[in-house]
Image (cartoon, rainbow, N blue to C red):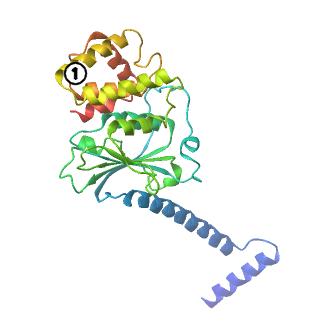
Amino acid sequence: MPMYQQGDSRSSEHALQNGEVDPAVSALEARQDEILRKLYELKAAVEGLAKTVTTPDADLDVTVSSSFSSQSSRSIMLEGSTDLDTLLGEDLGALRDIVINANPARPPLTLLVLHSLLSQRYRVLSTVHVHSSVSSVPPQLQSCLGPRHPDSYARHLFQLGFTLIWKDVPKLEMKFSVHNMCPIEGEASVARFLFKLLAPYPSDPAAATLVDSWVDTAFFQLAEGSSKERAAVLRALNSALGRSPWLSGPEFSLADVACYCCVLQSCAASSAPANVQRWMKSCENLGHFSSTKQLLQ
């Protein structure tokens, strides 16, 4: 052993005299770089967990899935593409977390469609949790955002965090920034927030009002109205879709997402008029609506 140490010392001295880098120093530097990299990833993961756990009701029992969502379905070209820094302010590379509490008794179908659209635009880290207030959640709800991604621990690789918590809540609620934002309540309000991450509302006030009107009609009359109200909405949808391919005109919008999901959830699809049936098929052909039917099975 002493002879080995002496030889190793002499080889190091020889390397230093010739201006070479000591192999032991190189190995130490490489190890230090690897430790720093792991510490950075750990720091990013802890920051993300802190954002989720410090919500007032984030008493989580089970982490079901975590995925990097990438859609192979047909893409939708939305007018007026958006930028996260422009919309939400520059955050020095930190992952922006969207945390949503939803009741499994009424799955928010619009959020699944919007999650799919967001995943087409951004690098989205998706996670599903089950809260202790819920006794059981069907498997299709536990996996509704896709399978776990192997790089889910490396939060710095993603642009947007999308966390869905199945919980016994009276209405859907969302928090985007735990520290400086009040919760957004109601599926319609959350859907509006998420869609604005994809495309701005129409600049024309009349067009924007038309979109909002269809969204309100979907959630308050199709989803919660009487059978007579639903029949009236289906007639209005049929009339509007006889004039244009989408509800707000020539372009796909949040109005189409909201009305499609509420027609489907109200079990009115089978009895819908011809124009509505054709429009629903057009929505399904886009590829982002496939998960909605699976959740209702």
Asked where in the image residue 55 lies, by quadrant, the reply is: bottom left
Asked where in the image residue 11 lies, by quadrant, the reply is: bottom right
Q: Position of residue 36 (x, y in %)?
A: 57, 66
Q: Quadrant of the C terminus?
A: top left
To which residue does mark 1 refer? 229
**Nearer to the camera, 287 or 238:** 238
Residue 211 shows in this picture: yes
Q: Quadrant of the N terminus?
A: bottom right
Q: Is residue 216 above or below residue 164?
A: above
Residue at disc 1, secondary structure: helix
Residue 148 shows in this picture: no
Q: Position of residue 63 (x, y in %)?
A: 32, 54
Q: From this viewpoint, which residue is outermost toward the right?
A: 18
Q: Position of residue 243 (x, y in %)?
A: 40, 9
Using residue 241 as the reference point, say whether residue 132 is left or right of it: left
Q: Residue at the spot x=38%, y=40% of the render?
A: 190
- Residue type at mark 1 is Glu
Q: Residues within 10 Å of mark 1 (few under 14, many from 20)?
A: some
Q: Residue at the spot x=54%, y=54% of the render?
A: 94
Q: Residue at the spot x=34%, y=29% of the render?
A: 216
Q: Residue at the spot x=21%, y=47% of the render?
A: 137
**Nearer to the camera, 259 or 294:** 259
Using residue 224 as the reference point, say whether residue 75 is left or right of it: right
Count of all numbered marks drawn on residues in the image: 1
Q: Position of residue 40 (x, y in %)?
A: 54, 63
Q: Is residue 114 above or below residue 34?
A: above
Q: From this viewpoint, which residue is outermost toward the bottom?
A: 2
Asked where in the image residue 262 lies, by quadrant, the reply is: top left
Q: Is residue 57 above or below residue 275?
A: below
Q: Is residue 140 above or below residue 155?
A: above
